[in-house]
């Protein structure tokens, strides 16, 4: 029943997003077409190189939108769930992101205790969430900085906090960051955090954010540990989570 429900919800979300996905791709095609037409008609265009770069950007944008959209369609039902150790999950994600961080002069730290309780998760999906969050952190630190991954638990939940020393997020932006297609980046898709939230909610967890403009951002995730049965309210979780890490 649970997986049927998840499937129906997923289809509904994909249906809601479909029009916007088509719109974004159409825009990219229009951009590429426009530049191709110009290049075809004029032999010596001075900004030829610039046109090629803009076309490549438009193609990458369309490709990112499609890739992210299709990720929503991937099976996220209970059949993909495995018992997984949080240490293993976080270490794997950290290793995946290490080289990209190093290239940007960013150090990636992990502060996690031993013996965290196991989770019942689709590890590929949860890794995608963590990677989306860390990528945002890297993008918010053009001059280098630090990303710290912390985790702790009580007997019902695992709490993960990912902090950066980046630009932070101003109040009007903060309200929208989980909305589909909301982005402040020239080449962003605005789907990263929307998808992250879908995945975490499908796992009966919560995702929240706390940010100080000019100082940095922390994303908080809670996930039920194996024995957890009921889910408390959102405000309760937000309060508990934020205070655990401050
Ligand atoms: N760690 C962060 N620091 C600063 N801004 C962030 C951070 N994470 C998310 N954001 C803001 O949230 C927006 C939405 O993020 P996301 O859904 O991943 O889309 P995208 O990265 O494609 O813009 C970003 O455009 C950015 O404005
Ligand atoms: Mg992103």
Image: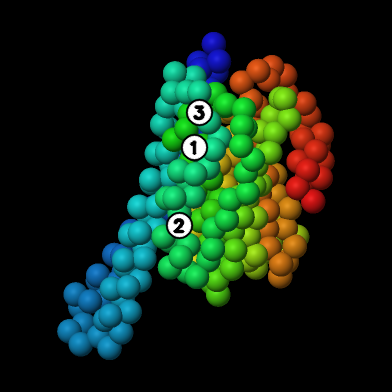
Mark 2 vs mark 3: which is more N-terminal? 3
The residue pinned by badge 2 equals 98
Q: Quadrant of residue 57?
A: bottom left
Residue 207 coordinates in the image, percent (x, y): 66, 40
Q: Does the residue labelled 1 lie within 8 Å of ligand 2?
A: no
Q: Position of residue 111 (x, y in %)?
A: 63, 49
Quadrant placement of the N terminus? top right
Identify the mark at residue 84; answer none if there is no mark.
Answer: 3
N-terminal label among 1 and 2: 1
Q: In this view, does 117 lie to the left or right of 64?
A: right
Please name the residue shown 72% across and 19% down the image.
230
Q: Alpha-carbon distance for marks 3 and 1?
A: 7 Å
Q: Is residue 85 above or below residue 147?
A: above
Name the quadrant containing residue 115. Answer: top right
Quick check: marks 3 and 1 in contact, CB under 8 Å?
yes
Mark 1 and mark 2: span between their CA atoms? 15 Å
Q: Relative to the observer, which residue lies in front, 216 or 118?
A: 118
Q: Residue furthest front?
A: 114
Counting the numbered discs, the total is 3
Q: Is mark 2 within 8 Å of ligand 1?
A: no
Residue 216 position, x and y percent, is 68, 63
């Amino acid at each position: 029943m649970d997986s049927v429900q998840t499937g129906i919800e997923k289809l509904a979300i994909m249906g809601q997003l479909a029009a916007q996905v088509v719109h974004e791709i159409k825009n990219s095609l229009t951009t590429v077409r426009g530049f191709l037409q110009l290049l075809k008609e004029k032999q010596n265009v001075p900004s030829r190189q610039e046109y090629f770069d803009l076309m490549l950007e438009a193609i990458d944008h369309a490709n990112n939108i499609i890739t992210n959209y299709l990720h929503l369609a991937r099976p996220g039902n209970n059949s993909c769930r495995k018992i997984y150790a949080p240490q293993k999950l976080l270490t794997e994600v950290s290793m995946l992101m290490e080289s990209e961080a190093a290239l940007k002069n960013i150090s990636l730290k992990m502060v996690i205790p031993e013996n965290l309780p196991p989770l019942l998760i689709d590890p590929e999906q949860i890794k995608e969430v963590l990677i989306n969050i860390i990528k945002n952190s890297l993008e918010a630190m053009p001059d280098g900085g630090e990303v710290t991954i912390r985790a702790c638990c009580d007997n019902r939940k695992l709490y993960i906090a990912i902090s950066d020393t980046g630009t932070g997020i101003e109040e009007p932006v903060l309200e929208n960051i989980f909305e589909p297609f909301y982005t402040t980046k020239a080449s962003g898709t605005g789907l990263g955090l929307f998808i992250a939230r879908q995945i975490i909610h499908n796992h009966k967890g919560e995702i929240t954010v706390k940010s100080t403009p000019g100082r940095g951002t922390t994303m908080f995730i809670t996930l039920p540990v194996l024995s957890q049965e009921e889910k408390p309210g959102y405000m309760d979780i937000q309060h508990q989570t934020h205070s655990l890490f401050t």
